[in-house]
């Protein structure tokens, strides 16, 4: 009886030892080496895991940065140039500076300018509405106003304006992660160059209909008249599909385009109010001789 127990224990010990040796050999054979710099790079990233870099979280992005030979096409929009400089220092590389960006809504079709023609009664989602029909107004290109962009923003940089029915971007909180750009089914968000003082000049419209049709559905729609295109001295404006577009990296904020727009679809934000040119009028004061064209000096 005692010998049987002893043999059982001895057999189990031998089997356990053999299993441990086999597991060790397998682990060594299939061991995955991970560069210790990945942890260091990840710790220097913001940790927002927003996907703005184009990768699934900061850990994945850190792995790509370590394994890549250069930083071309790789950038953390949340951390910006400071973060990329720190990463470059860790990896012994150089990081080219990139102009900071901010999200902009390319639609100014408020309730005042773009009246509703029907009422939607369904799931409160822009994606759902876009899949079903063109929306509650006559403009099939405009904002649907249900806030999908607000829901995906991890930085509290977006909120819906109850008066206008449009989302509003908080420039100070926006990290240009691009989540709103991806979420909008109408492609109404764009990442544009961030100027000092949050200055912006852009065409707040995506309507590609011809002038009369566009104007009928929205009072501030771009009608493709090309007047802004003709006066731009920096070749920053292009015309495509009855729609003007201002390149924020070519634009010098000269403000020559906005006054030319007959529908006020070009927005100027962060600038002083323009001084209207006073009309030159000559007061007609009757003289003692009764001459109505004589002017008192």
Image (spheres, helix red, strand yellow):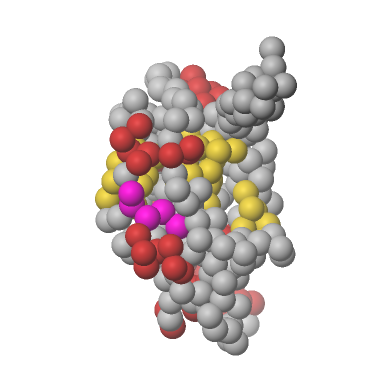
**Residue 12 location (% of width, % of height):** 53, 70
Magenta portion: prevailing SS class: loop
Question: Quarter-wise, where is residue 272 in the image?
Answer: top right
Residue 223 in the magenta stretch? The answer is yes
| Quarter of the image where one finds residue 145 | bottom right
Give the residue at x 31% y 62%: 210
Left or right: 29, with 295 as reference point: left
Residue 53 position in % (x across, y down) = 45, 44
Q: Is residue 155 left or right of residue 222?
A: right
- Residue at the spot 66% in from the left edge and 61% down from the top edge: 164
Q: Is residue 265 above or below residue 33?
A: below
Question: Quick one: quadrant of the C terminus?
Answer: top right
Q: Where's residue 289, x and y in %?
A: 67, 22
Q: Farthest residue toward the bottom?
A: 121
Residue 84 is a magenta residue: no
Is 236 situated above or below 297? below
Q: Position of residue 88 (x, y in %)?
A: 46, 23
Quarter occupied by the N terminus: bottom right
Residue farthest toward the front in the current orientation of the protein: 289
**Would you say 72 lies left or right of 19 here?**
left
Nearer to us in this view, 106 or 98? 106
Magenta residues? 221-225
Q: For this rendering, which residue is in front, 40 or 263?
A: 263
Q: Residue at x 45, y 48 (%)?
A: 262
């Amino acid at each position: 009886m005692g010998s049987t127990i002893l043999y059982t224990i001895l057999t189990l010990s031998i089997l356990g030892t053999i299993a441990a040796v086999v597991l060790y050999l397998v682990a060594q054979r299939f061991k995955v080496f991970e560069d210790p710099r990945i942890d260091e790079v990840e710790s220097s990233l913001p940790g927002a895991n927003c996907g703005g870099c184009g990768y699934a979280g900061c850990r994945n992005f850190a792995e790509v940065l370590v394994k890549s030979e250069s930083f071309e096409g790789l950038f953390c929009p949340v951390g910006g140039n400071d973060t990329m400089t720190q990463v470059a220092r860790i990896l012994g590389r150089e990081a080219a500076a990139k102009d900071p960006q901010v999200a902009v809504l390319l639609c100014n079709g408020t309730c005042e300018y773009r009246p509703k023609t029907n009422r939607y009664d369904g799931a409160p989602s822009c994606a759902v509405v876009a899949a079903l029909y063109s929306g509650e107004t006559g403009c099939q290109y405009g904002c649907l106003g249900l806030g999908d962009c607000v829901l995906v923003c991890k930085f509290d940089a977006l909120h819906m304006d109850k008066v206008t029915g449009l989302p509003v971007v908080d420039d100070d909180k926006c990290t240009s992660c691009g989540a709103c750009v991806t979420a909008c089914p109408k492609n109404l968000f764009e990442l544009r160059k961030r100027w000092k003082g949050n200055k912006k000049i852009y065409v707040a419209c995506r309507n590609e209909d011809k002038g009369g049709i566009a104007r009928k559905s929205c009072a501030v729609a771009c009608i493709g008249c090309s007047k802004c295109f003709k006066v731009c001295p920096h070749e920053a404006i292009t015309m495509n599909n009855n729609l003007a577009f201002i390149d924020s990296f070519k634009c010098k904020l000269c403000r020559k385009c906005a006054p030319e727009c007959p529908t006020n679809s070009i927005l100027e934000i962060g600038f002083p109010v323009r001084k209207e040119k006073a009309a030159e009028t000559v007061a007609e004061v009757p003289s003692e001789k009764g001459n109505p064209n004589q002017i008192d000096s």
